[in-house]
């Protein structure tokens, strides 16, 4: 089992920044790749960013590319999502998730076996 706990959400003005954190506990580490998703009110949960190789290769949704950065601190068992130049359309609940390294796809929520409880991000215009 893997437990995920997000933090760092909040209210920010458009153009501002936030950093989300996801602390991983339980059966951690090398057998899982981490990703971030978000879900706005009335919408489907959508892919935001993910690690896709053990070497640290990353992938981003087009809507956040060049504004958001996924990173990790293995010593702290923590994954981060740095969000810059935030827009009102980034408003959503943000979730971190873990998928098996043997799963070769990563952009579908069905690819992920473990989820955090989410943290809310609100961007005001």
Image (tube, helix red, strand yellow):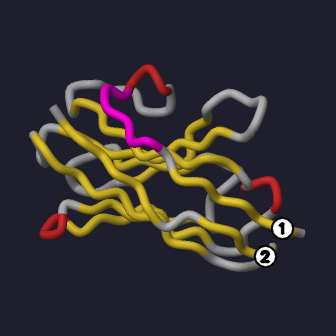
Q: Residue furthest right?
A: 125
Residue at 34% over, 51% down: 5
Label annotation for residue 13: 2
Q: Where residue 76 appears, x then y in whole percent?
A: 18, 68
Query: In which quadrant of the rendered image does the C terminus lie?
Result: bottom right
Of residue 7 and residue 68, the one placed in the foreground of this image is 7
Residue lying furthest bottom in this view?
A: 16
Question: Which residue is identified by label 1?
Answer: 124
Up/down of 24 relative to 13, above or below: above
User: Which residue: 53% across, 53% down?
Assistant: 119
| Of the image marks 1 and 2, the number of the one nearer the N terminus | 2
Q: Quadrant of residue 85?
A: bottom right
Find residue 31 and report its horizontal and vertical position in percent. 13, 38
Residue positioned 48% across, 27% down in the render: 109
Specify start and end residues of the magenta stretch as a single range: 112-117
Q: Magenta stretch mostly in which secondary structure?
A: loop
Residue 108 % position (x, y): 50, 26
C-beta proximity under 8 Å, tags 1 and 2: yes
């Amino acid at each position: 089992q893997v437990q995920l706990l997000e933090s760092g959400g909040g209210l920010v003005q458009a153009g501002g920044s936030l950093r989300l954190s996801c602390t991983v506990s339980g059966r951690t580490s090398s057998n899982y790749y981490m990703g971030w998703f978000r879900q706005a009110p009335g919408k489907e949960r959508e892919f935001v960013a993910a690690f896709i190789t053990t070497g640290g290769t990353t992938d981003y949704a087009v809507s956040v590319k060049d504004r958001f950065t996924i990173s990790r601190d293995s010593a702290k068992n923590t994954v981060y999502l740095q969000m810059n130049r935030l827009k009102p359309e980034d408003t959503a609940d943000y979730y971190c998730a873990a998928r098996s390294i043997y799963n070769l796809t990563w952009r579908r929520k069905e690819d992920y076996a473990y989820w955090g409880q989410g943290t809310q991000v609100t961007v005001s215009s």
